[in-house]
Image (cartoon, grey):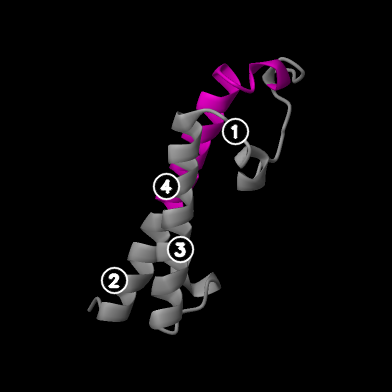
């Protein structure tokens, strides 16, 4: 039987997935707009690791709104874990 704690863990997992999707969308918007010059430095297939810090100084309001949403998702995820005594590692199990 599925428990309340199981539902919370699933919710945290869903929030993590949503965060990743929104962050990918943010990168796509940035690389086709304000960060287009940087995007052109990379070859197709290159693996580049970005963090939210890379976009903090963006002047694009759309990037800033997506960045704020990523932050809100991260905050909500962390709050659910903390309030319910869940481990980050166990939130995806």
Task: Find out whether the residues at labels 2 and 4 contact each other: C-beta distance under 8 Å.
Answer: no
Look at mark 4 in the image and give the residue it sits on. 69
Asked whether residue 93 appears in the rendered view, the answer is no
Quarter of the image with the N terminus is bottom left
Give SS at disc 2: helix
Q: Nearer the viewer, residue 10 or 74?
A: 74
Question: Upstream in the sequence, badge 3 or badge 2?
Answer: 2
Look at mark 1 in the image and give the residue it sits on. 58
Give SS at disc 3: helix
Q: CA distance from mark 3 to mark 4?
A: 10 Å
Residue at 72%, 34% (x, y): give it: 48
Asked whether residue 91 appears in the rendered view, the answer is yes
Q: How many marks?
A: 4
Task: Find out whether the residues at labels 3 and 2 contact each other: C-beta distance under 8 Å.
Answer: no
Mark 4 neighbour class, 10 Å CA radius: few under 14, some 14 to 19, many 20 or more: some
Mark 3 neighbour class, 10 Å CA radius: few under 14, some 14 to 19, many 20 or more: few
């Amino acid at each position: 039987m599925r428990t309340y704690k199981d539902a919370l863990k699933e919710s945290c997992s869903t929030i993590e997935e949503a965060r990743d999707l929104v962050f990918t969308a943010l990168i796509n918007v940035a690389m086709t707009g304000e960060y287009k010059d940087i995007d052109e430095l990379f070859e197709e297939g290159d693996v580049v690791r970005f963090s939210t810090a890379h976009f903090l100084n963006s002047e694009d309001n759309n990037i800033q709104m997506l960045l704020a949403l990523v932050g809100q998702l991260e905050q909500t995820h962390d709050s659910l874990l903390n309030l319910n005594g869940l481990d980050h590692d166990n939130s995806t199990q």
